[in-house]
Amino acid sequence: MDEEAPEFSETMRLALLQLSQDRDFWMRSIYPRLVVEASDEFKFRKESSAPSGFIEWRSGERLVESARRTLLAGAKSYMGPDRHFVNRHGRFAHRYLDQILMGQSAPGSYIITAYAPPNAGVPLSTSAVTPSIALPDLGLASVRDVSQAVVRAVQATVEALEHYRSSGSLSGFEAGVVHGISYEMTNALLGIAENSDGADISVEWDPALPPPVELDSHFELQGSDVAPLNKAAAKLASDESSRFTTMIGRVHLLAKKQAGSPGVFGIEALASGPAKKVRVRLSDEEEYHEAVRAHEEDLALQVSGRLEKEGNLSWLYDATVLRTLGPISDFARPSRGPVMRGQISLFADEVTDSTSDHH
């Protein structure tokens, strides 16, 4: 950087020579940083059994989706802690996401890179005007402050996981809500750890601003973390003051009357429960994608919500998609009641005559 230094010309020549011989390094590591100027960098990495630099298609989609949800969940926690945000602070979180650029995937393990300009501003409300620099008195939050909230929430969730590994207790998740743990964050990290041979999130703060203190920069996840994260997500999503029900079923109906609305889907129970078919009214539009994926791939879906009966229809209100499970064929069909003598039971793959000796 010092043009007066005696070795400047030779050092610059060698640097340019190296870049000219390694175009991939230039395009992957240097050019993006020059384009976005100052930028904090998030990396979401997932170990894959595919060759270096590749990943199974659906696992790649899941990683991108989970990285997005991690950023959104952490941004919501910036506005204030909560066990389950539902649709609260969703618009603010998406305004934060609008400031972020997604970088090219790096070779090796599959990596999603996000660049967050620390000096940019995020309007606290839809009425705020967005200048190029965040000014608190104009109702703006700096992207750096929101990014710190994201990292703080990830760190608290990983610490709660470590506590669970040593104690078998979910109490760390409850205690960590004040630090940003939420249903949304646990569910996002579950997606990163799921079907992986190891995954991690790392953060590199741009030196344009002083780095935050008391925040880690590297967080590791394991495939075995899926079970406790799933339990924690279900616990944080529950509302003991209302009659909330959890059910596993097959998505058989999808409806979205208005663009940008959370959407409604129908689910048919795959186990005995209070209702066989239920209409699910989601609280978060992001989760509609999970229902679409479950429908397209014939996967069982686990949902939770407030069960109410309206006429001949059963509804789950303020519903949350807890998890996408395995193929529908892996789950038992709901009980259809006893077959009386003289009746014939016709199900998908069986014909049973109750007058015979086999029924």
Image: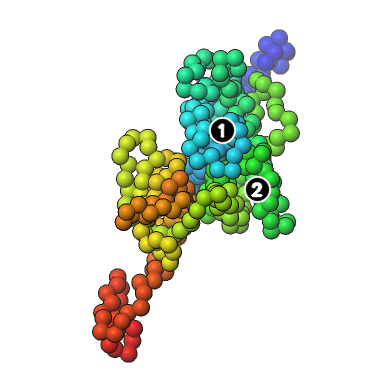
Q: Position of residue 49 (x, y in %)?
A: 52, 54
Rendered location of residue 249, percent (x, y)? 41, 59
Tell me if 183 is positioned left or right of 213 in this view.
Answer: left
Q: Residues within 10 Å of mark 2 (few under 14, many from 20)?
A: many
Asked if residue 279 lies left or right of residue 33, the reply is left
- The x and y percentages for residue 235 are 58, 52
Q: Say which residue label 2 marks.
A: 173
From the viewer's side, name the closer residue of 211 and 344: 344
Can residue 180 be seen? yes
Calculate the distance from the C-alpha at mark 1 to the C-alpha at mark 2. Answer: 18 Å
Seen in the picture, residue 298 relative to 220 is either above or below; the reply is below
The residue lying at 69 percent from left, 49 percent from top is 172
Task: State which quarter of the image contains the N terminus.
Answer: top right
Residue at image position (55%, 49%) is 241
Compare residues 212 and 7 and report the one nearer the observer.
Answer: 212
Residue kind at label 2, given as amino acid type: Phe
Residues 292 and 282: in front is: 282
**Could you say where residue 234 lies in the image, as x and y percent from the top left?**
55, 52
Above or below, comparing residue 323 to residue 272 in the picture: above
**Residue displayed at 32% across by 79% down:** 339
Residue on which disc 1 sits: 75
